[in-house]
Image (spheres, helix red, strand yellow):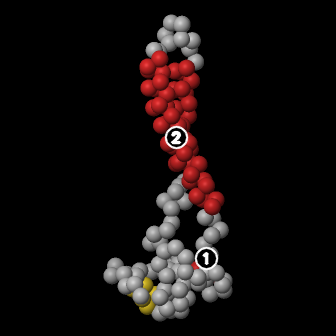
């Protein structure tokens, strides 16, 4: 498992739509709190309007913030990592980036890198074994 991948990267679209419904609920609460005139019948007192507005803002921040950040993470990291077949052909793929890198050649662990429960890993670039727990 690569520790540098964001959990927001593979958020399904239906989940983003579902979470954004909470943001729309927050907008609806704001409209229902502030739309009636303050001198009319049925208007909530000012304290309840302010308190309800803070709760609605929290709903909007969660409901709109999570899908927007997931879309930004998905578009920002879509072309950053090369495929495992491109590791031998690209010059930038075997430079050490974030995450684990081979102490022999400096190549990153990659998507297809297998790590045993004890931490032994085989480099896909130079085919040498190394342990992720040992720092050289």
Which of 24/38 is in front?
A: 38
Residue located beneath label 2 in the image: 61
Q: Quadrant of the C terminus?
A: bottom left
Picture residue at 43% right of the left edge, 85% below the top: 121
**Which is more N-terminal, label 1 or label 2?**
2
The image quadrant that residue 10 belongs to is: bottom right
Task: Tell me how far mark 2 sits from mark 1, CA to CA.
Answer: 35 Å
Q: Is residue 4 above or below residue 52?
A: below
The image quadrant that residue 125 belongs to is: bottom right
Picture residue at 51% right of the left edge, 6% below the top: 41
Q: What element does badge 1 sit on? A: loop
Q: Position of residue 4 (x, y in %)?
A: 49, 68
Residue located beneath label 1 in the image: 83
Which of 116/43 is in front?
A: 43
Of marks 2 and 1, the one in the foreground: 2
Q: Position of residue 126 (x, y in %)?
A: 53, 92
> Few, some or many C-alpha atoms within 10 Å of disc 1 (few <14, some 14-19, many ≥20)?
few
Q: Is residue 125 above or below residue 81?
A: below
> Few, some or many C-alpha atoms within 10 Å of disc 2 (few <14, some 14-19, many ≥20)?
some
Confirm whether residue 120 shows in the render: no
Q: Position of residue 3 (x, y in %)?
A: 45, 69
Q: Position of residue 68 (x, y in %)?
A: 59, 48
């Amino acid at each position: 498992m690569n520790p540098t991948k964001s959990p927001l990267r593979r958020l399904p679209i239906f989940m983003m739509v579902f979470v954004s419904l909470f943001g729309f609920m927050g907008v609806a609460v704001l409209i229902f709190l502030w739309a009636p005139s303050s001198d009319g019948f049925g208007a909530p007192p000012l304290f309840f309007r302010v308190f309800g507005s803070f709760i609605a803002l929290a709903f909007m921040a969660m409901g709109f913030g999570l899908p927007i950040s997931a879309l930004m993470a998905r578009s920002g990291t879509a072309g950053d990592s090369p495929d495992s077949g491109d590791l031998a052909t690209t010059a930038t793929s075997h430079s050490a980036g974030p995450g684990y890198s081979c102490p022999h050649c400096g190549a990153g662990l990659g998507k297809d890198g297998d790590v045993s429960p004890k931490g032994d890993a085989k480099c896909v670039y130079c085919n040498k074994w190394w342990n992720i727990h040992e720092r050289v």
